[in-house]
Amino acid sequence: MKKILLLAAIIVISNSAFSQSVESPRITAEGKNVKISYGQPSKRDRIIFGRLVPYGEVWRTGANGATEITFTKNAIFGGKPVKAGTYTLFTIPGEKKWMFILNSELGQWGAFKYNEIKGKDVLQVTVPASSVKGTAVEKLTITLPSNKLVLEWDKTRVEVPVRS
């Protein structure tokens, strides 16, 4: 009887451990007066833009919880002024252009409730998309080199000018 109970306990523990979803790691990118926190998904042989992440639809710009961007000082994002603070960063990917959206509603899981909170958009900017030269970028990568935000994943690269 003890063996049966022990075996049953092991099965229950094993099943619960394997059934939990694996979350993408949370990454922080920092630049001069700007910080971005995002979930970093991997390509894993998938077609990303146009399939996994549909064109023309609001995207959380990462995995799991929506991406957040913090400006420690008033700044210019994509040519538009933005006040110091933390915002949710959504995007609408396109084949040739992307829209970046800063929204004041924090703590979003994905972009599932975007239509309910879009009235809290602080700004929207549209920038051109280009192709990554060389091999595809395996993990979504957002960096903040001097005076810009750069997003790369798969064969897509998008840049937004940022000044603070």
Image: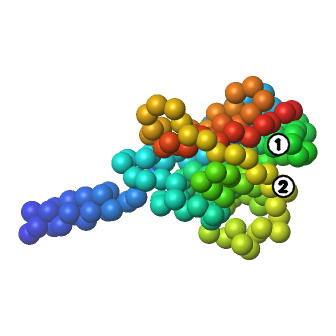
Give the image's coloring scheme: rainbow
Marking on residue 125: none
Q: Residues within 10 Å of mark 1 (few under 14, many from 20)?
A: many
Residue indicated by mark 1: 77
Q: Secondary structure at mark 1?
A: strand
Which residue sits at x=86%, y=42%?
79
Q: Quadrant of residue 117?
A: bottom right
For the residues labelled 1 and 2, say whether their Cβ atoms are less than 8 Å apart.
Answer: yes
Which sits in the foreground, 10 or 60?
60
Amino acid type for the residue under numbered disc 1: Phe
Residue 63 pos. (x, y %): 54, 53
Taking 31 as reference, is 59 left or right? left
Q: Quadrant of residue 147?
A: top right
Residue indicated by mark 2: 123
Which sits in the foreground, 65 or 15?
65
Q: Tell me which label, 1 or 2, sits earlier in the chain.
A: 1
Which residue sits at x=43%, y=34%?
135
Residue 26 shows in this picture = no
Residue 152 shows in this picture = yes
Residue 4 against residue 104 in the figure, above or below: below
Which quadrant, please, contains the C terminus?
top right
Residue 45 against residue 75 in the figure, above or below: below
Q: Secondary structure at mark 2?
A: strand
